[in-house]
Image (spheres, rainbow, N blue to C red):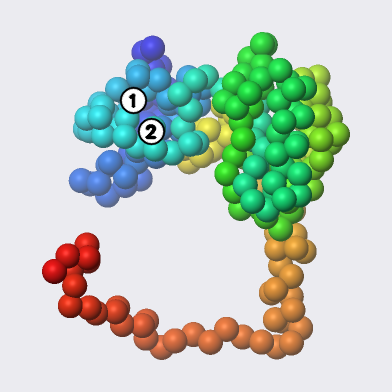
Amino acid sequence: MTFPDETVTEARSIIERYPAGRSRSALLPMLHLVQSVEGCVTPEGVKFCAEQLGLTTAEVGAVATFYTMYKRRPVGDWLVSVCTNLSCTLLGGQEIFDDLSRHLGVGHDEATADGTITFEHAECLAACDYAPVMTVNYEFYDHVDPASARGLVDALGNGERPAPTRGAPLCTFAEISRELAGLPPARADAVAGPAAGVPSLAGLLIAERDSRQASVADEPPAPATTSASSDGGS
Ligand code: FES
């Protein structure tokens, strides 16, 4: 596709944030930008980023295919991710994934027939203290079980936007992609909502209660020196 003038303008505003000669540093937000337009990163999106940044399509493609947040197939309004990594799976994450997969009639990295929900399993979502967790467009739903997970996707299918357990209100995949690109959020309350909860702060609260402080070294430790070269050769 040909990207609209508005996208070109936004791409330039992203690139301008970086020092001269380092425009390639804008690639990650640029990929979110093209994803917000196309729903995924297409070959045209790769070409667009390459042209704007003076890179080769191979360089852009190497980055776009490395990170799982960049999708190869169009994502619907709702990217539903169920964590199946260790902490969550020990507490039922795989059962939740399997149950939702049957309920939606799709497997990993597939979209529902109407295209509105894209379903995937995810590696650790960095919320093990709330396991098992799932996200919709990267917003957290904590301590889910098969019934609550089904209720969540059913609500999405009915046009509702269930409030995440923590963080900002839910927005669409296109909207969150624009925010990840660093563009002004479409939702005024993008940074609203409860953030860290008690499970995440437990250690800190105990340390404060006991007046404990972490010791800070005056100097960083000297790097270990060996006679061998860094690749293990001699
Ligand atoms: S293992 Fe699921 S959030 Fe860490």
Q: Residues within 10 Å of mark 2 (few under 14, many from 20)?
A: many
Is residue 52 visible to us here?
no
Q: Quadrant of residue 47?
A: top left
Residue drawn at x 25%, y 29% is 58
Give the residue number, with chain letter if any, for mark 1: 46
Residue drawn at x 26%, y 34% is 59
Residue drawn at x 75%, y 36% is 96
Mark 2: is the Cβ under 8 angstroms from ligand 1? no
Q: Quadrant of the C terminus?
A: bottom left
Q: Is residue 200 above or below residue 123?
A: below
Amino acid on which the number 1 mark rests in the picture: Val
Residue 18 vs residue 144, the one in the foreground = 144
Query: Which numbered disc covers residue 97?
Result: none
Location of residue 204 in the rendering, given as x and y in whole percent from the top left corner: 69, 74
Q: Is residue 214 above or below residue 136?
A: below
Which residue extends farthest left? Answer: 234
Amino acid on which the number 2 mark rests in the picture: Ala
The tag earlier along the polypeptide, 1 or 2, is 1
Q: Are marks 1 and 2 in contact (CB under 8 Å)?
A: yes
Could you tell whether 125 is left or right of 32 in the image? right
Give the residue number, with chain letter if any, for mark 2: 64
Location of residue 24 in the rendering, given as x and y in whole percent from the top left corner: 28, 41
Q: Quadrant of the N terminus?
A: top left
Q: CA distance from mark 1 to mark 2?
A: 8 Å
Is residue 87 visible to us here?
yes
